[in-house]
Amino acid sequence: MKTIIEPFRIKTVEPIRFTTAEERQALLRQAHYNLFALKSDDVLIDLLTDSGTSAMSAAQWAAVQQGDESYAGSPSFFRFEAAVKELMPFKHVIPTHQGRAAEAILFSILGGPGRKIPNNTHFDTTRGNIEAGGAEAHDLLIEDGRHPDREHPFKGNMDLAALEAFLVKHGADVPCVMLTITNNAGGGQPVSLENIRAVAALARKHGKPFLIDGCRFAENAWFIKAREPGQSERPVKDIVRDMFAEADGMTMSAKKDAFGNIGGWLALNDDDLALKARNRLILTEGFPTYGGMAGRDLDALAQGLKEIVDEDYLRYRVRTTAYLTEKLHALGVPVMRPAGGHAVFVDARKWLPHIAPLAYPGQAAAVALYEVAGIRSCEIGTVMFGAKPDGTEAPAAMDLVRLALPRRVYTQSHADYIAEAFEEVARRKDHLKGFQIVEQPRLMRHFTAKFARI
Ligand code: F0G
């Protein structure tokens, strides 16, 4: 059979609420045109994030019932730890309430003024945690990854020459090398196994620990299987193990590729680093056998980690993203191609060329999509990345709008509706106006900034 279907049937449903265009215009005004400020009940299809929004399986809900809430030494922790180590064989697994807590702990130890941390592209919370401690976050993505319309099978790859030059120039100030798989901020694009190994080799050569931000590791592994020479016959689980065998540790948001509604971890091989991290964990998250999670969360993740490497699931998952990407491309909407793993990325700078980057074309497109069809998406561009630590502002490398697809949540007719909404926005697009920011915090402004139409 050619049709790739959802490899599950639906047992529990949640109604979604329809609103009128007039209601949505009023709601947008109340939210100061920041989609994070909308109530989710006022959103018909919520593509704000794939984080924590997965539908859990019957087996995960059953696992929740097994959760043991003991403060210390809970069996839930040992089931969770075993499930992590089955895929990522690190010596120490330190549970946190989500990914950014793992980052905060890591950079409280490795960061600080004068330190410089390279990555293919730091996600905003990673960058935020690095900069909050006074260190610098550097993005060394390959050139092809910076162009939404360039076809390349691994647009998340690190620029190896740039990394080598960086390590030679700044060696003494670099506490670790990071790699984000898949590269969320750069379009949900994968990193090849070859590139992971080469980055690891460079880090080793310069005596630096190599850490993977593994939020979407299973999607990345599927792309390796599908696209990398010599990998097509290998089980995804083996590819996952190979990816992490190269690293000295990882940060993880279990809200993505672990089917969790909450959770994360920091994993490390180094005993001394792990000791410092656990001491920090006790201060900020909790005792090392639960960290920031309840026992029931740990059990849900242990089961989720088994399900996420299922190849029928991954084939369907990556197909849903490609399906929507192809539909939008056929409509003439410029989209990041090839399709990434967890989201469709629209190139708003190209789609709305009459709106300058500093008037936020991504924000204009995202607001229009909500106004027209009640769909919530997320600007990943100058609003998110344009503010510099010194208070100045510059256009981000790209102005994208992300349509993140929650796992196992929406169906093909939802995707068709989203494409139809784009058709409608496309009809009005030349009349869309840009935005200015009227109020913003110092760090991570996109969550709480207030906007006004120009
Ligand atoms: N790293 C990456 C690559 C991420 O995508 C995220 C979160 C984090 C770290 C932080 O994890 O949210 O559990 O604290 N990304 C979400 C998103 C928020 O919508 O892409 P967290």
Image: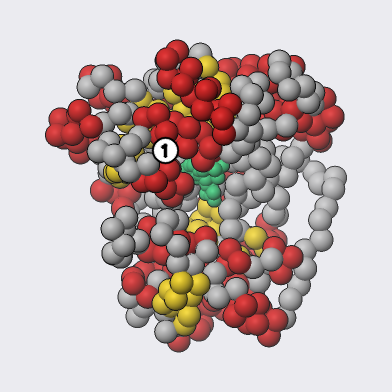
Can you tell which quarter of the image residue 121 is in? top left
Q: In this view, does 170 lie above or below 358?
A: above
Left or right: 390 in relation to 217 = left
In the image, 378 versus 198, the foreground residue is 378
Query: Residue 356: image x %, image y %?
Result: 33, 75
Quickly name the residue at label 1.
Answer: 180
Q: In this view, does 250 lie above or below 181?
A: above
Which three-letter amino acid code belongs to the residue tagged 1? Thr
Can you tell which quarter of the image residue 306 is in? top right
Query: Residue 145: image x %, image y %?
Result: 33, 49
In the image, 13 versus 152, the foreground residue is 13
Query: Residue 369: image x %, image y %?
Result: 57, 72
Left or right: 341 in relation to 353 = right
The residue under the point 35% across, 61% down is 387
The residue under the point 78% across, 26% down is 69
In the image, 287 versus 92, the foreground residue is 287
Query: Which SS class for mark 1?
Result: strand
Can you tell which quarter of the image residue 372 is in? bottom right
The residue under the point 32% across, 55% down is 389
Left or right: 196 in relation to 412 = left
The residue under the point 60% across, 49% down is 50
Number of numbered labels in the structure image: 1
Circle 1 crowding by C-alpha within 10 Å: few under 14, some 14–19, many from 20 = many
Q: Visible in this render: residue 87?
A: no
Q: Is mark 1 within 8 Å of ligand 1?
A: yes
Q: Is residue 434 above or below residue 189?
A: below
Colour basis:
secondary structure
Q: In which quarter of the image is the C terminus?
A: bottom left
